[in-house]
Amino acid sequence: MSMEFVLDRIGPNSFKVLVADLTRELTKLSLKVIDTGTLHFPADTPPTTVRWPSFLQGGVWTGHTVIDCLYVPKESRSSWTAAEFRAALAQRLDKEFQTRERARAVQDGDGFPPNPFDYRPPDYRPPDYSSGAAPPLPPEPSPVFTDYLVIATNLPASVISPPDCSRLLAEHAEALGLKGWKIWDLTTLTTMLAQAEPVRRKYLSEIAPDDVFSRLHEYDLGVTKPVLDLFMTQATNELDGEKYVRLSQAGDATAGKIPLSQVGVDLPVKGEAKMAARLIIEAADTASPFHRSGPVPNVLLLGGPGQGKSTIAQLIGQCYRTALLDGSLSPQRTSHALLVSLQKGLQEARIPRPRLRRWPVRVNLAEYVDWAARHHQSLITYIAEAATPFVEGMTGRKLRSWLKAWPWLLILDGFDEVASAHDRDTLMQQLRNFMNESESLGGDVFVLATTRPQGYAGEFSQHGYQSVELASLERQQAVDYGLKLAQARHSDDPEMRKKVSERINVAANDKFTARLMRSPLQVTIMSILLEARERVPRARYALFNGYYETIYARETTKKDSFRELLENRDRDIHELHNWLGLMLQVKSEQAGDLDASIPADDLRLKVVQRLRDEGYDQAKATKLAQQIIEALIERLVLIVPKRDREYGFEVRSIQEFFAARAIVSGSDTAVLHRMGQIIEPAHWRNTWLFAAGKAFSEREHIRRDIVTLLTDIDSRDLVRMLVSPGADLAFDLLDDEVANNVPVLQRLLFDRALELLKYPPDHDLRRRAPVLFQQAALADADYLAVKLDQAIAQAAGGTPAQVEAAHAVLRLAGQRATPLALKLRQRLRALERETDPSRLTGEAVTRRITDAWDRSLRDSHLSVPDDATAKAFLTQAMTSSTEEPLHWDYLDSCLSRPAVAAALARATLATAEIDAAMASKLRDLIRLWVQRKASGAGLLDDTDA
């Protein structure tokens, strides 16, 4: 079969680029390609000699050649006839004739500079220069008109009728001075693409027909047909393997899983009108060879716990698979119905079809890092091995041939789950190696990475990634998603669907429960809770706890073999969930051991050991343990099979919830000790907040002690004072509204959060400052409003770093119509007016900074080795850049020495009085070290789980 191409959906600019590239490849010349019908050249343009290949009717043209493109989009194509095309061509030629006549007339007249785009009006009079004004510029030389013309169009020969068009060109040839012409229709361009292999491969994914994936062997990609069939099989099987959403069974195994096509939605983005999936797909399309003029930024998708970043990545992957497989799966194939269903769901979600049909590859980063630690091999080798569940026989060699032949979308999911800084450095190096190899092969790879904002230190931003941060769901978005879930879960039960839908609307209109509907995971949990309850909890921990209790109670009502076991062994099952959550959270913090799963044998041994401790003999304990594990896997389904006979939680937030339950167990002293132990690392942030929520709701007598933990950690030493992890957590507790009903604790948390205005600002302050405004706007919050205004006023009159912190907060005051917001906007304008534009810059600032560092190190009274270490660190920090950052091993080697760390904190505080940017840079490095230090060791020995 001959090659086939679709050229009516790429747009006029891309069509012009394609024609230019084809001409360049086939003639080795860069001819003038236009789409305006203007056939002129600058006066000094030299002539060229074009030797046309035989399949383009041959011939040698010496002179000036123009290729005039006439592109017709798909939606307009049916309205074009041969007569209309000739009329359009005649109109262009007539316009050109008139242009040339006017140019000649002007040139032959009074010497007015010939400009075919800007002619002098008839009543023009020469200016009077007698007053001494500068004389006019000399006339420009006449432009050069074309000698040869090519008409290129994406219309077929049946529409343009080449013989008729040639006659029309012949009629205009003498008047236009044309020596020769050609007409390229769709058939001609198809022939050119077949001959120009580099151009064909470059643009194939955008100009091939819908069924290209079943016909790839016809396009001579340098990949054998058996290998191409392998990729077709993998895409089809992955389409099926990725068809369900996570947490879809939700404790009801008999209800079946929920297809992504039924509940997949696009999610809002901070500061953007476009939704996340649309924005990312359009960014990947912008990286098309048609549009790319330089490096195109890849995308980093940031989202908090349960906010839907992995689901968006899954949805985008499916979007690309449907685009690849569309037209290639016959209706008789079992996957065809799934394809149609996904297409319908994507259309309803208003997620666009990619123009550039990339090959999607999803990499679970925690699994990859664990694998790489054991095998010490490349990312592409892992991708080949990870394809095994979907296709047999995949190898790195086959992937490299495919990487060379077809554009890819590389999805790197879960960077936040790579908690070890050493593992992060290794991962980024492996990614650089992969991208370098792709570039050497001539590959086209667009990368989408996902991570939580907490603990992210700019690793991807250093390489030019565009950050896209998910926003909280608006009320109507949350309701719409909840209704989709109700429809999917209860499609055959109208009464239950109606009941849940009504309850979701009620919850969304209650100000206390509406704040627990800000993420897809929260809406999912709330939807499940509302199947059994009329009202839901009003706190985040209580929401997750109610979810677990609801699905557990539901299973105990079913009359089957598991009912008695679930009723009688409930304590064992609860404690097993808690222990597993904590164990996996500790395990995933360690370098080279990030995958949150446990071998089946280890899980069974844990259950057996617990039962033996309760007095069961080995045989009875072994039998009962197997029954308990079956109940966990088959009925509660929060713990799921993962890989190679291993088990783990399907959703990370659920794992963190159970880890928090384990932490808040035992004596109050033990609970406070554990919470103090994990208060700093970003890896434990969500677990810590769950634990605080549990303690605030169930152990009221230690609530003030928990708030005191925040103050204690920030006053432990100079490093913690500078980084203020306690103030950081105070923001999160305010956002969770754990103390809104306890004004004294709310004020303490608010005061603690405001401490961050004393130090150089970081990205998290800019991201979370709206929490301050929300709290200060609450009823009876005059104290908070006054404290916020005072803190900003103090910062605005402080060091350059404090002024920048005040700026960061004030810029986010927004357009709120409150007295406080109005006052803050006025303060921002005043601050901007007062900013000193003559502030020292360049070498003067550098000298002041280095002098301040010298004083700080002298005041620290360091030993000779520590002094050398601190000086080297500061020097490297000053010269480091986003392209060449300091590596973790070096950072850790310096800051693990207490005296050096304290001296560097002192130097940072001194820098804050001179230059905000340098102070923020130093603080970010120290903060990164604090947040990445592993701290979970010993927790398993210190809990009742």
Image: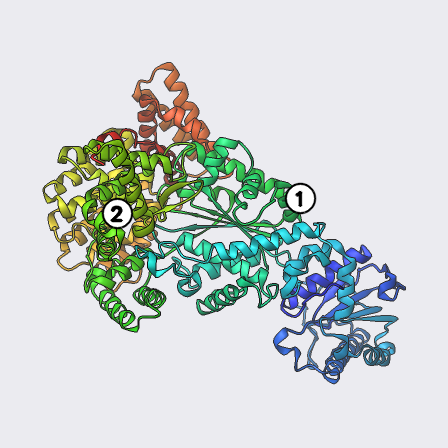
Mark 2 nearby-residue class (10 Å; few <14, some 14–19, many ≥20): some
Quadrant where the image shows the N terminus: bottom right
Q: Position of residue 871 (x, y in %)?
A: 41, 23
> What whole-number distance in Å separates the C-alpha atoms at marks 2 and 1?
46 Å
With 129 as the anchor, is 57 left or right in this view?
Answer: right
Residue positioned most to the left? 701
Label pair 2/1, CB-CB below 8 angstroms:
no
In the image, residue 694 above or below residue 192: above
Q: Secondary structure at mark 1?
A: helix
Q: Secondary structure at mark 2?
A: helix
Mark 1 nearby-residue class (10 Å; few <14, some 14–19, many ≥20): some
Q: Which residue corresponds to the image point at 13% horizontal and 35% vertical from the top-left?
A: 667
Query: 143 or 598, which lies in front?
Result: 598
With 567 as the anchor, is 487 left or right in this view?
Answer: right
- Which residue is labeled 1 in the image? 441
Q: Given the image, on which type of amino acid does mark 2 rest?
A: Asp
Q: Earlier in the sequence, mark 2 or mark 1?
A: 1
Q: Which residue corresponds to the image point at 30% horizontal and 50% vertical from the top-left?
A: 768
